[in-house]
Image: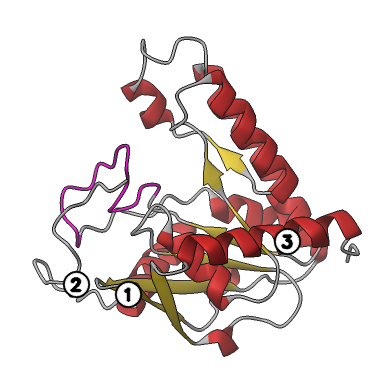
């Protein structure tokens, strides 16, 4: 396992300080199931994506180990924004992806900010970085839905309780890291729900670890993770059920 450098420690402390500042007066976190996270070694947290900002802040509040979130960059609209976010993600060692459907939606409006070929190159770099992080014994957080319910720019979700099918790309870097390590890597489902108030309260629940080898196929693993994350988020599994109590009716917020 790689040692944590002084620069990484400084970055980690700075990010946690920023997260506390962003959450102050706006969000408090109630976490359960922390004991399901390993105290050391690699792990992948598979989490519901509800709020574009608060989901990450709940993780910062609950998880004391250093973690790395897989993020997207296709929402930026200026070259300066692209350079800034790339720099931040590079310093934090957060694997960065582009969503092909998001690029298609903005085709003709983003100019040369991103090209279709960038999707593959970003995916390749994110894969390499994610495997490296897991081999080094780090925690990676993924939001397989791809989009949150509440976002200031765009989300395909039309209902507050909507839950998108999981994208399965993260399974590839888990498998690759396991080959490098010669060991299984725990995949921890995590659910989140919010109660609206001053401040909001985020209820974050971690479930018991699943292992890729315990399921017959990638499809079965994804289906099981979706089920567990929904349960942990308080989402009833029957169609048409209500899920998140006390959340404001507006989806897009600043």
Percent from the top left, x then y, of residue 194? Answer: 30, 72
Residue 56 in view of the camera: yes
Locate the N terminus and report the quarter of the image it occupies.
bottom right
Q: Is residue 5 left or right of residue 105?
A: right
Residues in magenta?
A: 146-161
Residue 153 falls within the magenta-colored stretch:
yes
Mark 1 vs mark 3, CA separation in Å: 28 Å
Q: In this view of the protein, which residue sits in the foreground, 93 or 175?
A: 93
Q: Are marks 2 and 1 in contact (CB under 8 Å)?
A: yes
Q: Is residue 226 left or right of residue 76?
A: left
Q: Kindly report which numbered mark, 3 or 2, lies closer to the viewer in this rendering.
A: 3
Up the image or down, 124 lies above or below 165; here it is above
Reading the chain from its start, which is encountered first: label 2 or label 1? Answer: 1
Name the residue carrying label 2: 243
Mark 2 vs mark 1, CA separation in Å: 8 Å
Up the image or down, 199 lies above or below 135; here it is below
Q: Residue at the location (60% across, 36% down)?
A: 85
Percent from the top left, x then y, of residue 241? Answer: 11, 71
Percent from the top left, x then y, of residue 237? Answer: 20, 74
Name the residue carrying label 3: 12
Percent from the top left, x then y, of residue 100? Answer: 43, 29
């Amino acid at each position: 396992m790689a040692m944590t450098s002084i620069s990484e420690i400084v970055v980690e402390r700075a990010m946690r300080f920023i997260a506390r500042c962003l959450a102050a007066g706006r969000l408090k976190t109630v976490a359960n199931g922390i004991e399901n996270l390993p105290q050391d070694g690699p792990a992948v947290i598979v989490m519901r994506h509800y709020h574009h900002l608060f989901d990450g802040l709940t993780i910062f509040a609950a998880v004391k180990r250093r973690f790395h979130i897989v993020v997207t960059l296709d929402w930026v609209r200026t070259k300066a924004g692209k350079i800034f976010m790339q720099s931040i993600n590079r310093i934090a060692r957060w694997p960065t992806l582009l969503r092909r459907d998001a690029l298609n939606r903005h085709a003709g409006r983003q100019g040369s900010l991103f090209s279709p070929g960038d999707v593959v190159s970003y995916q390749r770099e994110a894969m390499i970085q994610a495997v490296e992080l897991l081999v080094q014994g780090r925690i990676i957080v993924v939001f397989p839905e791809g989009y949150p319910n509440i976002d200031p720019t765009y989300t395909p979700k039309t209902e507050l309780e909507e839950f998108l099918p999981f994208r399965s790309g993260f399974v590839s870097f888990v498998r690759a890291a396991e080959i490098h390590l010669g060991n299984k890597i725990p995949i921890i489902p995590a659910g989140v729900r919010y109660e609206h108030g001053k401040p909001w309260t985020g209820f974050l629940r971690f479930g018991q670890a699943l292992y890729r080898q315990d399921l017959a196929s990638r499809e079965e693993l994804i289906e099981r993770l979706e089920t567990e994350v929904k349960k942990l988020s308080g989402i009833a599994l029957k169609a048409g059920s209500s899920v998140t109590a006390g959340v404001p009716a507006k989806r897009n917020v600043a």
